[in-house]
Amino acid sequence: MKILVVDDSRSLRHSLHLILEVISAVILDAGDGLEALEVLEREGPVDLVLLDIEMPRMDGITFLEVVKKDPRWASIPVIVLSGVGQRESIIKAVQEGAKQYLTKPFTSSELLSRIVQALEIEGGRIP
């Protein structure tokens, strides 16, 4: 399984790596939406995107708009990881095609549960 983590916080990306190692995921990183598009172009489709909303250069909403219009990437499930107080952004992200969202801070068990739900894995287990 290949997961793209898109967040401008290096420390959060590092924390997500530690959580995702449990499920033996191949983890790709991007510091903003523009870099994430470059990763997708270079690496091809991923199984899941974990996406922050507020980032430099290209924010999460704009990234979602671009990805969901591209047939190569439109079906990739996206989980938005948002800060408290971004309700309007969360609503917009869901309207743009985000599968789920989590409000920061969240626990590793919450994140893993959302990943299972987003990927709609039969039996609730990640391969």
Image (cartoon, rainbow, N blue to C red):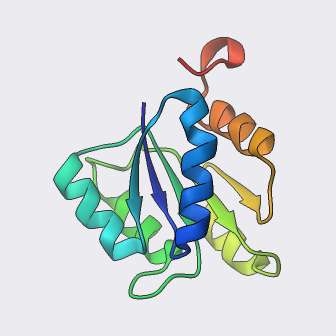
Tell me, yes or no, if residue 98 can be seen here: no
Residue 56 located left or right of residue 17: left
Tell me, yes or no, if residue 69 can be seen here: yes
Horizontal and vertical percent position of residue 104? 77, 66
Horizontal and vertical percent position of residue 82? 70, 69
Which residue does the image show at 46% across and 65% down from the upper left?
A: 64
Horizontal and vertical percent position of residue 95? 61, 64
Which residue does the image show at 19% across and 57% down from the upper left?
A: 41
Q: Is residue 6 above or below residue 77?
A: below
Q: Nearer the viewer, residue 115 or 87?
A: 115
Q: State the count of labels.
A: 0
Which residue does the image show at 73% across and 79% down from the upper left?
A: 88
Residue 21 located left or right of residue 34: right
Q: Quadrant of residue 14?
A: bottom right
Q: Is residue 59 above or below residue 91?
A: below
Horizontal and vertical percent position of residue 25? 47, 34
Outermost residue, bottom direction?
Answer: 57
Q: Is residue 119 above or below residue 121?
A: below
Outermost residue, top direction?
Answer: 123
Instruction: Quadrant for the N terminus, please.
Output: top left
Which residue does the image show at 59% across and 74% down from the upper left?
A: 53
Q: Nearer the viewer, residue 76 or 82?
A: 82
